[in-house]
Amino acid sequence: MSQTFALVDCNNFYASCERLFRPDLTTTPIVVLSNNDGCIVARSQEAKQLGIKMGTPLFKVKDLLAHHKVKVFSSNYTLYGDISQRVMQTLETLAPHIEIYSIDEAFLDLHGMQDAAAHGQTIRATVLKNVGVPVCVGIAPTKTLAKLANYAAKKYKATNGVVDLRNPQRQLKLMALTPVDEVWGIGRRLAKKLGYHGIHTALDLAQMNTRSARSRYSVVLERTIRELNGESCQPLEQVRAARQQIICSRSFGTKMTDKEEVRQAVCEFVSRAAEKLRRDRRLAGRAHVFIRTSPYYSNMATGTVLHPSDDTRDLLPLATELFDQIWKDGFRYAKAGVMLSDTCSPQALQQNLFSTPRNDALMATLDKVNNSGKGKIWFGSQRPRKDWFMTQENLSPAYTTRWKDLPVVR
């Protein structure tokens, strides 16, 4: 029997999260800004209809936003991450298998489902009821077609948010109406190259010779063509591949010149990266530290962890040493960051006579306290300060993760 995939995608996710606890903004245009409130990275449907483009610098459209009374928010990643987790937990109850593809998308396995379209409506209603976030559902025999079906579910209101694309005739009709750059994995640059060869729609691409696509472009494009023709080449990935690197970096709210303050920020990033490492149950074999004055100038140093570790106490001294190697007086630093790489599983690590004994209980306790919302524990070299980080003049409360920000119903 053929596969049946459903792609569930949250509608205007960041904007929907901001609207979730603000019913007064139900019909108000909303935009969400990037780090340091620089550019627009998310828009509600109302904002899109005003012609506001993704990636537009805020200063260029300030007058437009004010004129149309658009509500502006700084990125609230804590809120978005928590709402995403609630959406995915709900989806896990609605399908036997699920692949979390991104913060606001997931593929579901609907293999053997008698009425997949009706189940798609159940998915929409359940997520809206349990979480409050609207979603659209695309159903098809391949992941690429499911993405295409989801595109149609969002674009055409008559679909009521669900498109079942298992019928070959419906596939051909939709592909003929869909620009090639709306196909999953076809970016602007590739779409431009394809256009030179007369390929302008998804149907044009589906009819392209697979051998020619592979030799002229790549095996990835060949796989996309096969998927557009109903041949499933990408199975559901229920277990995420282990991350080979973890990055923690931030732009500063204002440029910094004090070495000790930047060092403390780097140590804070090490601590956060180590926590992510422990969450993934991985050990890091290398550490990289960078500091940047602008997008055009940065310094980086790399060092090897003596024995691969997830213990913050092992990683802090190395990061501090690397930071000292790259620091230069007289510069105004705008950003710093840490990357942990060459990760491996603790079970795959061969211990030796000189390995430092692991203290998982201590690190687990540290993480538990820091994630409890009741307080924080940090190392002396961190000294975290709020004024280091991004300018977020329009930040909404952490409604779901901070006690003092819990909404109060009167």
Image (cartoon, grey):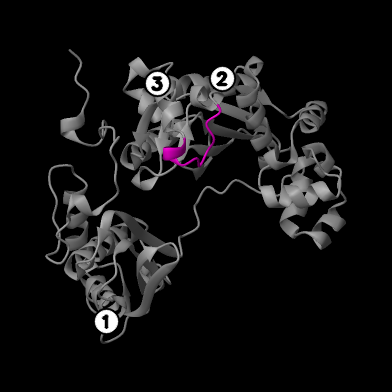
Quadrant where the C terminus is found in the figure: top left
Closer to us: 192 or 123: 192
Quadrant where the N terminus is found in the figure: top right
At 36% across and 77% down in the image, what residue appears?
301
Tell me: residue 361, above or below residue 353.
above
> Residue tagged by mark 3?
69
Per the image, label 3 sits on a secondary structure element best described as loop
Tell me: residue 290, above or below residue 198.
below
At 34% across and 63% down in the image, what residue appears?
337
Q: Is residue 167 left or right of residue 366?
A: right
In the image, the segment drawn in magenta is 51-60
Type of amino acid under label 2: Gln
Q: CA distance from mark 2 to mark 3?
A: 33 Å
Badge 3: how crowded within 10 Å, few (<14), some, or many (20+)?
few
At 44% across and 42% down in the image, what residue appears?
39
At 34% across and 59% down in the image, what residue appears?
248
Give the foreground label among 1 and 3. Answer: 3
Type of amino acid under label 1: Ser
Type of amino acid under label 3: Lys
Q: What mark, if any, has residue 355 been given in the picture?
A: 1
Asked whether the beta carbons under mark 1 and mark 3 sit within 8 Å of each other, the answer is no
Q: CA distance from mark 2 to mark 1?
A: 55 Å
Callout count: 3
Q: x%, y% of residue 305?
A: 32, 78
Q: CA distance from mark 1 to mark 3?
A: 61 Å
Q: Residue furthest top?
A: 410
Q: Is residue 165 magenta?
A: no
Could one spot residue 285 in this view of the protein?
no
Q: Is residue 55 magenta?
A: yes
> Residue tagged by mark 2?
121
